[in-house]
Amino acid sequence: MGIPMGSDEWALALKDEVNKSEGYRMASLTWEDDFYFIVTKGGPITEDLLVYVDLWHGECRDAFRVSDPGVKSPTFEISAPLDIWKKVSNRELNPIRGIMTRKLKVKGNILKLIKAPKSAIELVECAIRLDTEWP
Amino acid sequence: MKTRYKGYTGKLLDVNLTSQTTGEYIVSDMDRERFLGGRYLSTKILWDELKPGIDPLSPENIFIVMTAPLTGTRAPSTSRYDISAKSPITGGIGHSNSGGNFGIHLKKAGWDGIVIRGSADTPVYIEINDDVVQIKNADHLWGKDTHTSQELMKTNDFKKAATMVIGPAGENLVKFACVVCQERVHGRTGMGSVMGSKNLKGLVVKGSKKIDVFQPEKFKEHTKKWIKSLQGHPATGETVPKLGTSMFVALLQRANALPTKNFSRGTFENYNQITGETLAKDHLIRNYGCQSCPIQCGRVVKLDGQEIKGPEYEIMCLFGANLLINDLDAIIRWNRELDLLGLDGVSCGTVLGFAMELNEKGIWKNNLEFGKKENILDILKLIAHREGIGNDLAEGVKYLSEKYGGTDFAPHVKGLELPAYQPQAAVGHALGYATANRGACHLDGGYMIYFEATGPVTLEQFHHRSKPAWVVLDQNLLAAISSGGSCLFTSWTFVPAIAFKAQKSKIISFIIRKILTYTWPSITGLLKLPLVFLKFHIPLLPHSKAIALATGMDMSFGKLIRIGDRGYTMEKLFNLREGIRKKDDKLAKRFTDDLLVKGNKNSRVQLDKMLPQYYKIRGWDENGVPKEKTLKKLDLNFVDISQLN
Ligand code: SF4
């Protein structure tokens, strides 16, 4: 049994994985922003599923599931339906390409994300390494 | 009654992409009188609507499409219209003018302009059919080039409609992404990336209404004469139709003003392989141009058996001499690709030249080399898709110089890359670059090169003291012409045909040059003359009379020039509010310190001498901030200047 995607446990596992990753650290030494990653309502997802992730200088300082979006006001919100997130985690969709093609919707300064492609890929690689159970 | 003036529809469309709603934006007649139309009226709207300091690529930015009173009338060369927003390149005022048919159709649909706010969740385009406005899904257009997207937008009833779109570069927020309308391009200041940030792929418009003018018969008569004068003029009737803007390659080479090897010199040894004459001889099929224009400065050329749009001067120089490339076929191909991808060729050519010099000097190893053409096509695609080194190049010269180095030879002003005129070879033109509100721009800068190097009669190229007054006059003049809706090329008739005869005599040319150079105080005097002394129209500038006859406004030569001055100052105020200051009115050291001509100490741009004089003539203080009495004179005293200091 894997860890249910988007659960608190999953968020914590992601945090550990990011903090173990030398690749992520090296690619993100100057990064200082936090995110909501959002799986939008649809199919098996009955209401928007939000995970808060705080990334700081190559480290993940915090990661947890959020039920009320007003709890935090992160610099970025990246949202997409489940099938798109699955494509990202299967490496079928490069996260930056996903942003450029607007399959991944961004609230916040898109350019800043586009200019950090290595960091985005390393972050996705950390998520891929988790034993995720998809809904 | 939306407006008491003819020539306008009196209505502006207001579209909110976030809420997917549409409405009307109200403009007062007072603002029409103050700014006429185009980019200046847009600047006033941006001033009123934008909060200072917003991110230009955020939903808070506003994107404006704006026509002018002459747009779509019978007046010659008036298909021009503007797009404006806060620029993602400079952080100041952004705008770009083009001659595609969108402005005419928009007006015929009953709209003088469109104010677009917010940002759509997914890619959309706006479809306008007279009063019916719809925001439509553009998933099928996203990722497509500018030609294909325009074709796809012309569905069923819209086969003959006008379109404007962004290409992949705009979608991917390349800083110097352009907007394309038919094959005409809104190149400068990154308006394509503003559209991309709003998930707005394009607009399509179809109009069935008539554009009324105030005195139809007199207007018809006046425009008839005007067209005749354009056709009979040596520049607009002969040289430009024959050679297009590419005629400048040879002219600028002769004037030591053809930017070569990243603007490090003004002549290119192989220039004759990339001239307008060579283009005409080897490739030209016919000339073409914007709707309603008797000049027809565009080129249709043949390449690989296909008829395609030919390159303008800027591309021929910046992808030719500036990169040390003399292959005209390759330049034509790149020109086509730039348009399809939606990249501004001026910024792009200058970015590549700068990157090549960084590579040559070992500052940034990037595999771009002067004279090497094999990888250019791929690089253009990398830039448009922000892949590999394209992601850095997509940010422009200023960013590259800050990240890697080379600020001393970085060709930009306020972040906007230099166009294809060597600054030291025409120091007034260079002053225009430094002071232009949208950053380094030959048109915003006053296009002094015509009076310094390429025109039939010129001022002394390296004479500094005479230039500020001329620059202010030219900036105001071009601003005025643009605000009415005319193509700036119509200003060529400002230099009478007789001057072209005079240039054949060396002695007469010499005398005229001296007169023009040393009578600059009279230009300053003219700029200061109260309006009551300028209440007339002059045949050399038929625009003011055309505007009067089209709109019914109280218009004169003096009033029109005043509108140019006001519009220009309004843009300056916008920039000041965004924190753009005197320190930004500058050029790279290469242009202010290096001599273009060995031994000629005046062949560098002495901005320190010219700027104070320029500010003074404009009625600005020593820091380049308009004085209160200047604002009063220009009816801009709704601005609280103390808040900008
Ligand atoms: S001169 Fe050229 S750019 Fe100007 S309106 Fe005519 S064709 Fe268009």
Image: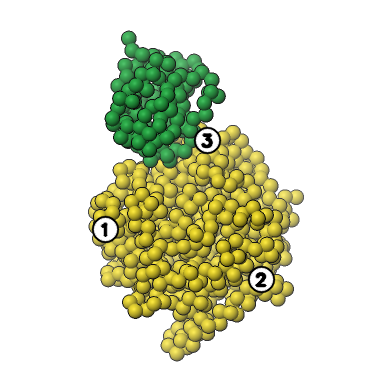
Chain colours: A green, B yellow
Quadrant position of residue B35: bottom right
The answer for how far apart the CA atoms under marks 3 and 2 are is 44 Å
Q: Inspect the image, locate mark 1, and give the three-letter code of the amino acid beneath it.
A: Lys
Quadrant position of residue A97: top left
Q: Which mark is residue B295?
A: none
The answer for how far apart the CA atoms under marks 2 and 1 are is 51 Å
For the residues tagged 1 and 3, is the chain the same?
yes
Does the numbered disc 2 mark a residue whose Cβ is under 8 Å from ligand 1?
A: no
Residue B52 visible in this rendered orientation of the protein: yes
| Residue B312 relative to residue B372: left or right | right
Q: Is residue B455 above or below residue B359?
A: below
Q: State the residue position of label 2.
A: B558
Residue placed most toward the observer, B534 or B286: B534
Q: State the residue position of label 3.
A: B120
- Mark 3 crowd level (few <14, some 14–19, many ≥20, 10 Å Cα): many
Q: Residue at x 67, y 68 (%)?
A: B559
Name the N-terminal-most of marks 1 and 3.
3
Name the N-terminal-most of marks 3 and 2.
3
Q: Residue at x 56, y 51 (%)?
A: B578
Residue placed most toward the observer, A80 or B300: A80
- Mark 1 crowd level (few <14, some 14–19, many ≥20, 10 Å Cα): few
Q: Which-is-in-front pick, marks 1 and 3?
A: 1
Q: Is residue B434 above or below residue B352?
A: below
Chain under callout 2: B
Q: Residue at x 45, y 29 (%)?
A: A35
Q: Which mark is residue B361?
A: 1
